[in-house]
Image (spheres, rainbow, N blue to C red):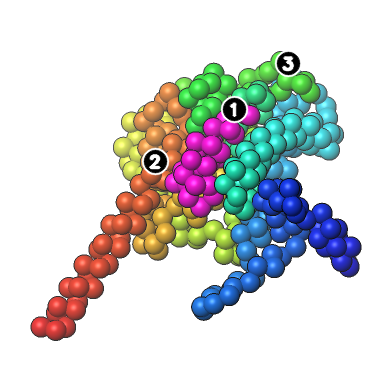
């Protein structure tokens, strides 16, 4: 397809003169449509065909299977709760209409702040929020009020990222910062052993359905089977229920090299090891739960694939990635089992390890330096 007409249009509207202050906004849209024309002037450089925009777009594409299934599951759970006999497409359409306002508010508020900061600093607009803006609606209850979503997005972008210099400079995952803000500021909308399912299009009523982790926190075995949890036909946070849909996104991220397989694998290994330890203790129903159930419940798989692997907030060294992932998985299961007041655990585990990632890398690098110095002394001796 010949897009010369579009490129000519961009050149025609390029802000100049008194409108040059809009340069950051113009560049954001121009470079989204076309590869930037920026070239290096001196020195040696390594060039890659995949820039940041393309990397973020791959993450967004990887999120689509979980997003589409989550939309359908909203309608499916609502139909079960109300006794309605809906066609599968109507279930998806119902969920789509419930999710759309959350996505629109997330992008509108977040991108407005991103553009404002870029204009103020005379910097290019960072692309990272293209993924963050979709992640936030996917990990909050579908009945979260839109004004709360807007507040959480503003807090995450300003306090969680922009105050540190913007994308690439933040040490906490912005999407999880938004969820943590909602959890601690409005706990009645975010916590407890129930999931809220919209009973009508505008959410004037809500029907409570117990989640598997909510049942375990109450001391009973999950009513859903392992197969139901694998497929995702269970109550839960909007797009975190389907292990299969999340796995499809993981395959794309691993195939393209966007996400670290070391982190992804180590999170599951850490969670499995902690689950087996609790199985050996077996003091209560939660401890006796088969270790692999933890992978299928709550946000464990979603966090391991899309949150823990965030290259900005994760450990950077190869050895550090193993340590980072193992501790995330272990702490997530530990928090679930030992803290009945908060049956999830993945969010707090990842945020805690985000803070620890620089220390992990520092210790790994220091150890490598010491080991090399020791080898050098032994060789010279």
Please tell me which residue is depicted at 69% across the width and 43% down the height of the picture: 67
Of the residues tagged 3 and 1, which is closer to the observer?
A: 1
- The span picked out in magenta is 149-177
Q: What separation in Å lies between label 2 and label 1 (alpha carbons)?
A: 22 Å
Marks 2 and 1: CB-CB under 8 Å? Answer: no
Classify 10 Å Cα crowding around label 2: few (below 14), some (14-19), many (20 and above): some
Vertical order, 192 against 161 (above or below): above
Residue 233 image position (x, y, % from top left): 66, 37
**Is residue 172 inside the magenta stretch?**
yes
Please tell me which residue is depicted at 61% across the width and 24% down the height of the picture: 148
Secondary structure at numbered mark 2: helix
Classify 10 Å Cα crowding around label 1: few (below 14), some (14-19), many (20 and above): some
Q: What separation in Å lies between label 2 and label 3 (alpha carbons)?
A: 36 Å
Residue 374 as seen in the image, left or right of residue 255: left
State the mark number for residue 151.
1
Classify 10 Å Cα crowding around label 3: few (below 14), some (14-19), many (20 and above): few
Secondary structure at numbered mark 1: helix
The residue beneath circle 2 is 352
Of the residues tagged 2 and 1, which is closer to the observer?
A: 1
Residue 16 picture quarter: bottom right
Marks 3 and 1: CB-CB under 8 Å? Answer: no
Please tell me which residue is depicted at 36% across the width and 30% down the height of the picture: 338
Residue 55 as seen in the image, left or right of residue 379: right
State the mark number for residue 204.
3
């Amino acid at each position: 397809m010949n897009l010369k007409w579009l490129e000519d249009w961009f050149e025609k509207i390029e802000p100049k003169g008194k409108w040059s202050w809009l340069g950051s906004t113009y560049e954001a849209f121009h470079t989204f449509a076309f590869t930037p024309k920026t070239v290096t002037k001196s020195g040696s450089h390594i060039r890659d065909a995949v820039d940041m925009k393309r990397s973020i777009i791959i993450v967004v594409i990887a999120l689509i299977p979980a997003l589409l299934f989550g939309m359908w599951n909203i309608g499916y759970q609502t139909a079960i709760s109300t006794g309605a006999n809906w066609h599968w497409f109507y279930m998806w359409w119902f969920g789509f209409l419930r999710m759309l306002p959350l996505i629109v508010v997330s992008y509108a508020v977040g991108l407005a702040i991103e553009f404002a900061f870029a204009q103020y600093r005379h910097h290019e607009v960072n692309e990272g929020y293209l993924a963050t803006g979709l992640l936030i609606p996917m990990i909050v209850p579908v009945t979260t009020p839109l004004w709360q979503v807007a507040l959480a997005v503003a807090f995450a972008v300003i306090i969680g990222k922009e105050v540190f210099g913007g994308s690439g400079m933040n040490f906490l995952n912005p999407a999880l910062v938004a969820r943590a803000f909602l959890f601690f500021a409005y706990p009645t909308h975010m916590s407890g052993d129930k999931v809220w399912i919209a009973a009508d299009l505008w959410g004037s009523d809500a029907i409570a359905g117990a989640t598997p982790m909510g049942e375990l926190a109450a001391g009973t075995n999950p009513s859903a089977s392992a197969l139901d949890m694998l497929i995702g036909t269970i109550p839960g946070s909007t797009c975190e229920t389907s292990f299969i849909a999340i796995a499809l996104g993981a395959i794309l991220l691993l195939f393209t090299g966007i996400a670290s397989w070391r982190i992804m694998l180590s999170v599951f290994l850490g969670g499995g090891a902690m689950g087996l330890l609790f199985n050996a203790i077996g003091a209560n129903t939660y401890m006796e739960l088969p270790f692999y159930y933890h992978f299928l419940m709550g946000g464990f798989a979603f966090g391991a694939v899309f949150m823990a692997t965030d290259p900005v907030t994760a450990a950077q060294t190869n050895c550090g990635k193993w340590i980072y992932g193992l501790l995330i998985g272990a702490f997530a299961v530990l928090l679930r089992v030992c803290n009945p007041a908060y049956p999830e655990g993945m969010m707090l585990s990842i945020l805690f390890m985000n803070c620890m990632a620089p220390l992990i890398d520092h210790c790994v690098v220091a150890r490598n330096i010491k080991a090399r110095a020791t080898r050098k002394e032994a060789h010279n001796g």
